[in-house]
Amino acid sequence: MLDEKDKKILRLLKDNSRAPYSEISRVVGISDVAVIKRIRKLEQLGVIKKYTVVVDFRKLGYNSVSVTGIDIEPEHIFNVISFLNGKDYVKYLALTSGDHSLIAVIWATDSEELARIHNEIAKLPGVKKVCPAIVLDIIKE
């Protein structure tokens, strides 16, 4: 069970996963040794799964990004997942119970490349429909 100090540590790490233990300990009000022990416990419990970097996709040359719903015939879903999982342009892939079988976040250098990617996906066996929503701006990460 997580207490308020654990939750505060998680919020601080979410804002800056490179925050020094000394800074976290000062904000949370516990020693840095206690912070280290709590972080290790959170890692062992699987609450903290990994540390990562958030990048600005546009500064990397990806000027077209979509959140794409993909409708798939059930017997083809795992083949489509396997195909998309191997593609560098797919940055996030989730199996869902909502309006679409899969949700994929796709990065492309321009709208033409994005259209080619969506067409490639649409031609996969079992894909019934590709429903892209183009990202215009990110409000919250």
Image (cartoon, rainbow, N blue to C red):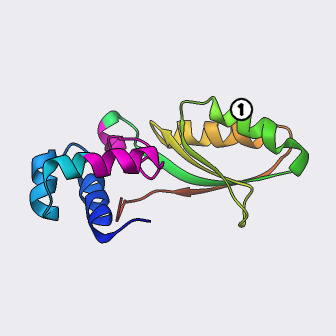
88 to 123, vertically: above or below: above
Q: Which residue is mark 1?
A: 83
Asked whether residue 92 is drawn in magenta, I would say no
Asked whether residue 57 is drawn in magenta, I would say yes
Judge from the rendering whether residue 23 lies leftward or rightward of residue 43; answer left or right.
left
Looking at the rendering, in which quadrant would you find the N terminus? bottom left
Judge from the rendering whether residue 32 lies leftward or rightward of residue 139; answer left or right.
left
29 to 89, vertically: above or below: below
Judge from the rendering whether residue 12 lies leftward or rightward of residue 125; answer left or right.
left
Please tell me which residue is depicted at 87% across the width and 50% down the height of the picture: 73
Query: Where does the image place residue 53, in percent across and percent down from the top left?
Result: 32, 41
Query: Where does the image place residue 49, in percent across and percent down from the top left?
Result: 45, 45
- Of 73 and 19, nearer the camera is 19
> Which residue extends farthest bottom?
4
Query: Where does the image place residue 125, in percent across and percent down from the top left?
Result: 85, 38
Which amino acid type is shown beneath numbered disc 1? Phe
Question: Range of the magenta residues?
Answer: 37-59
